[in-house]
Amino acid sequence: MRVVILLLLLAAPAAGQMSEKDARLLYQQRDAERGRLWRAGEYGKAVALLQAMAADPGLMAVPEIRGGVRYNLACGYSLVGKKVEALAMLRQVVDDGPIDPAQIERDPDFANIRSLAAYGEILNDDRKRWEARQRFWDSPAMRTPYRENLSEDERVAGLVRFWSEAKYNFAWFDRLVDFDWDAKMVEFLPRVRAARNTAGYYRVLMEFAALLKDGHTGVTPPSEARDELRSWPGLRLALVEHRVLAAQVLDEALSAAGVKRGTELTTVDGLPVWEYGARFVMPFEGSSTDQDRERHAVLYDLLSGARGSEVRLGFTDEEGRKFEVAATRLGADRRQRYPEPQRPRFEFRMLDGGRVAYVALNAFTEDAIVADFQKAWPEIRKAPALLLDVRENGGGNGGNGSRILSYLIAKGGDVAATRTRLYRPAYRAWGRPEEWQTQTWSVEPNVDGGFAGPMVLLVGPGTFSAAEDFASAFDGLKAGTLIGEPTGGSTGQPLQFALPGGGWARVCTLQERYAGGREFVGFGIQPKIRAAPTVADFRAGRDTVLEAALAYLRGAGR
């Protein structure tokens, strides 16, 4: 029997069988038409289209397409009054794999069948299976509440959960040469057992997660422990030319001592700043590149410690005067007096005498950024040149970036190639190697021709995650010129899960590359023209990179 199974699994695809990529493209086209019919109230035509899709073996071979078609068909049958067919199709959807019962309950398309007994039975069956699956993957046993001292069993369980989730889901083990993940778990077991309290335990977990060297993989401690782990003085820092500078001075004692914007931080507790960072900060930084690790360490973690503790900071001012100041780390309640400066998600203004449209896309977390761009687009496209800025964009929803990019380009195409691990227990038992599921992503062009003039995209180490998806697509489609510094070098789909004591963790599950296979995770997207801030310009309040981009547009770009 085993031989027969293997022969079937290894059989070649049938001639003419639709590829998964072609199936996804066809589904996108037909589902767009289905959506148009739906919005127009032409449910009968939409049902006929869905029936044709359900009869297409190429489409139905892709599980998520099959689920989407069947769910929409159940909705369509309900809307046209075919209650028996609607119930039968909804049963198929649920039997194929439970879905969130709340989605079914709030969907108005099922109003025609909601009062039927069979609907209630289907919903109850779905709820039981859904809750069972949720317990399996996210058991309440791992969601114990915060206590200052977790039990030893809870601490061990949290370590083992992170180890297990990473072992079967982490996307980048192939880059960790001579690395034994199981051995690392064994090595860290006595450390989590010996942790003096919950905050100390989470610090050990953060170091464990950082071993995977990935910007989308890490541990976040519970909020109750953050004052002990992540309190810092009233001072915000910047990293410029590999030097640590004061960016914003909030503590009156520091200001009185002579610390101002641009003053260089040279020592921490008597150690040179980078030696201190290497010993007490870098081991806890889960980053894919040096530029992201150093930036994150300086901006967020370099001066972190326990609330109320004192840290000795050594400075050198612009005239070369050296001095030292003792600063107290502030808790969350005191930091509320100094809220983090918030950049608007979208900025638009005209520069260079109205010849350059400047658009800063500072976050893709909110869908509203697309509406912001759409509103400004009629004015943006009038400009002779366009300067886009994602240097401070830490990511969010990559779809928002794709929708904005589609306005700008006259020619679309493939923009990303992704893959995720396919772990099949039986394959491992048979000694077969692990396989991967691959997918190619594309962006549709603007039917009105996109932006006609030259475009520049400003990037830097703060360009991260979904913003890198945007930058790699912009670069891959040759939409314009990238200017600045290499990006953070990390993107992908993180899997988030709870840990005992109220913290949580995430593990990157997806590899992403340029559509042609070029790597940028672990390296950063490389600009065509290098431009980086200088200490002198930082102190003078000048934007070195922006000025370089404007100079480029005045010359070769125009």
Image (tube, rainbow, N blue to C red):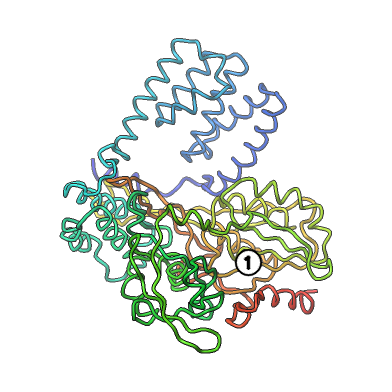
Position of 62 relative to 88 (above/below): below
Q: Is residue 296 left or right of residue 240?
A: left
Residue 365: % across, % down: 56, 50
Q: Is residue 66 above or below residue 328?
A: above
Q: How many numbered marks does the figure carry?
A: 1
549 or 48, nearer to the observer? 549
Residue 158 as seen in the image, left or right of residue 320: left
Where residue 257 sits in the image (x, y, percent)? 48, 77
Classify 398 as above or below 386: above
Along the viewing direction, whichever of 33 and 294 lies nearer the viewer: 294
The quadrant the N terminus occupies is top left
Seen at 34% across and 68% down, the residue is: 310
Give the residue at mark 1. 475
Q: Quadrant of residue 522?
A: bottom left
Depth order, front residue of 188/446: 188
Quadrant for the C terminus, please: bottom right
